[in-house]
Amino acid sequence: MSTRRRPPRAIDLHIQELVLDGFPSGDQYTIREAMESELGRLLSTLGLPSPDASIRTLDAIDAGSFRLPPGSRPSVVGQEIGLTVYRALVGKMGEPFGSGPNGA
């Protein structure tokens, strides 16, 4: 069975906390802005899996980790974080409802 993705009608996404350990505090705004931009681009162009078009609420997503070359620009770091979060979100949305922690 293939999982189809459709551009969303509306998605309400709230990121309460983005932990950026190991990055200069001056780069954190640029990283967050680039992450939000990339995540928005991916959601608007690729959408999300739509199993039964059910409404889902996810309390948390562990996007794991990623590697970048030393000295990567903050905007590149943010884009990679956005892609990593998108992949984790797509993976989580593909799980049967109620299979994750806290029923998400």
Image (cartoon, helix red, strand yellow):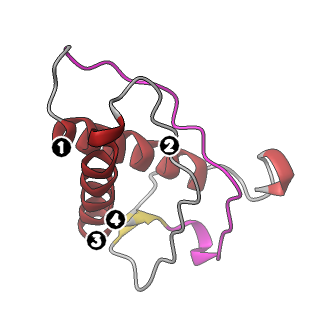
Mark seen at residue 43: 4
**Residues rendered magenta in the picture:** 50-69
Q: CA distance from mark 4 to mark 1?
A: 18 Å
Graded by Cα atoms within 10 Å as few (under 14), some (14 to 19) or many (20 or more), the crowding at tag 3 reads: some
The overriding secondary structure of the stretch rendered in magenta is: loop
Q: Is residue 27 left or right of residue 3?
A: left
**Residue type at tag 4:** Leu
Mark seen at residue 44: 3
**Residue type at tag 1:** Ser
Q: CA distance from mark 3 to mark 4?
A: 4 Å
Q: Earlier in the sequence, mark 1 or mark 2?
A: 1
> Which image quadrant for residue 79?
top left
Residue bearing mark 1 = 75
- Total of numbered circles in the picture? 4
Dots 2, 4 in contact, CB < 8 A: no
Q: Position of residue 11 (x, y in %)?
A: 47, 77
Q: Earlier in the sequence, mark 2 or mark 4?
A: 4
- Decide: is 63 above or below 85: above
Give 61 or 52, whichever is nearer the viewer.
61
Give 18 or 64, whichever is nearer the viewer.
18
Dots 3, 4 in contact, CB < 8 A: yes
The residue at 30%/65% (across/down) is: 40
**Residue type at tag 3:** Ser
Residue bearing mark 2 = 88
The residue at 71%/53% (across/down) is: 96
Q: List the single residue furthest toward the bottom.
A: 9
Q: Position of residue 88 (x, y in %)?
A: 50, 43
